[in-house]
Image (cartoon, rainbow, N blue to C red):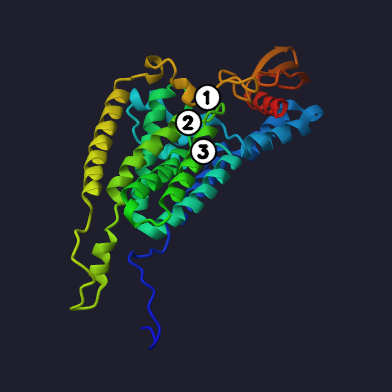
């Protein structure tokens, strides 16, 4: 209770203690550690060094460390639940639409996503609570996975980026639906739009799944109208006024435009997800039906080629104990004399060292 002469701070909305977002971060980190364990980095590095021999053992160890920590093997990520369209459409492994958002392809990948989740997610959880933000995070992640599976048919996809862009999308719809309770409306809208545009622009770089970003953003943009609608201040003031004291004429809890936006968003969201699941079930390849859509994920420039092979892909040939490798992304070529040229782990780690 405030002392005499003091006024109690007016807080019309409940403030929540954020525990779910830190829990999500811990879960992502734990699964990344699990991915490292499945990759079995020490064992594979030792096997590669033994196959390569002492002459290039140091390079092998450096490449092995690079491969284990920065670029875990996508095949092993696939075993843990990474998204591949064929396994979802043909083998009906629908759970991959959810599991892929908890996996990451390297240290830089997980650090960037988890820092973003902490900065954005904790603020939203404080404002709206764990239930609504948790629902937004998961559904937007699935929406991102769904659009990625329809457009990136031949790719393997992991990461929480779709869910993170979903949180940005929900912030935009929350600002729109609660427009009347904001003071600096235009400044807040301009700042948020600039952040969204900059983040989406990063998605045009090669080897970034911008369709997951777009799918997560659009899904949670519409879901935000449903879950993040606030009562109006006239209603709140009346609700919190002292017994027998009426601050003004009672107002309805929500404005008409909020209800209209909620209904429209809910219809679009349900129809969109149903359509996406049906198309995916029938093996629909959206990239074949849209000749320009690939530019949404990567725009070729003089600095990069969208069709270029991944940075750790090499062409190899061997003659006796000599192994010739050519890195596809850099064009560098090297010849190694190794004891086991046909050892796949040795070739993989040497390729990582050559391309890095």
Disc 1, SS: loop
Residue 20 or 88: which is nearer the viewer? 20
Label 3 Cα crowd, 10 Å radius (few <14 / some 14-19 / many 20+)? some
The quarter of the picture where residue 328 lies is: top right
C-beta proximity under 8 Å, tags 1 and 2: yes
Q: Residue visible at 65% across and 23% down? A: 303
Residue 309 coordinates in the image, percent (x, y) = 59, 20
**Which labelled disc corresponds to residue 199?**
3
Rendered-image quadrant of the C terminus:
top right
Label 1 Cα crowd, 10 Å radius (few <14 / some 14-19 / many 20+)? many
Rendered-image quadrant of the N terminus:
bottom left
In the current view of this chain or complex, which residue is farthest to the top?
319
**Which labelled disc corresponds to residue 210?**
2
Residue 172 or 347: which is nearer the viewer? 172
Q: On the image, numbered disc 1 is attached to which residue?
A: 298
Q: Is residue 120 left or right of residue 327?
A: left
The quarter of the picture where residue 69 lies is: top right
Q: Is residue 106 above or below residue 335?
A: below
Q: Earlier in the sequence, mark 1 or mark 2?
A: 2
- Tell me if I can see residue 93 in this picture: yes
Residue 250 coordinates in the image, percent (x, y) = 18, 65
């Amino acid at each position: 209770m405030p002392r005499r002469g003091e006024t109690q701070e007016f807080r019309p909305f409940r403030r929540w203690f954020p525990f779910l977002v830190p829990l999500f971060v811990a879960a992502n980190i734990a699964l990344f550690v699990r991915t490292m364990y499945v990759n079995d980095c020490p064992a594979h590095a030792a096997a590669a060094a033994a196959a390569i021999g002492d002459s290039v053992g140091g390079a092998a160890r450096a490449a092995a460390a690079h491969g284990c920590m920065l670029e875990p093997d996508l095949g092993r990520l696939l075993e843990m639940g990474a998204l591949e369209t064929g396994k979802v459409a043909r083998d009906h492994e629908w759970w991959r639409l959810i599991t892929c958002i908890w996996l990451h392809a390297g240290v830089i990948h997980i650090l960037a996503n988890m820092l973003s989740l902490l900065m954005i997610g904790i603020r939203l959880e404080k404002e709206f609570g764990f239930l609504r933000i948790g629902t937004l995070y998961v559904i937007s992640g699935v929406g991102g996975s769904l659009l990625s599976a329809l457009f990136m048919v031949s790719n393997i996809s992991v990461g929480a980026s779709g869910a993170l862009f979903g949180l940005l999308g929900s912030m935009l719809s929350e600002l729109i639906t609660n427009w009347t309770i904001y003071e600096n409306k235009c400044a807040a809208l301009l700042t948020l739009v600039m952040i969204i545009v900059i983040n989406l622009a990063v998605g045009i770089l090669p080897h970034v799944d911008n369709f997951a970003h777009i799918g997560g953003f659009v899904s949670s943009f519409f879901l935000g109208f449903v879950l993040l609608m606030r009562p109006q201040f006239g209603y709140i003031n009346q609700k919190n006024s002292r017994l027998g004291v009426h601050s003004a004429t009672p107002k309805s809890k929500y404005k008409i435009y909020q209800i209209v936006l909620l209904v429209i968003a809910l219809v679009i969201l349900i129809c969109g997800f149903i359509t996406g699941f049906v198309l995916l079930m029938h093996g629909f390849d959206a990239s074949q039906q849209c000749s320009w859509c690939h530019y949404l994920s990567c725009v070729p420039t003089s600095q990069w080629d969208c069709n270029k092979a991944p940075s750790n892909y090499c062409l190899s040939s061997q003659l006796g104990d000599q192994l010739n490798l050519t890195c596809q992304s850099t064009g560098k070529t090297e010849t190694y004399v190794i004891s086991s040229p046909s050892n796949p782990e040795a070739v993989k780690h040497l390729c990582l060292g050559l391309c890095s």
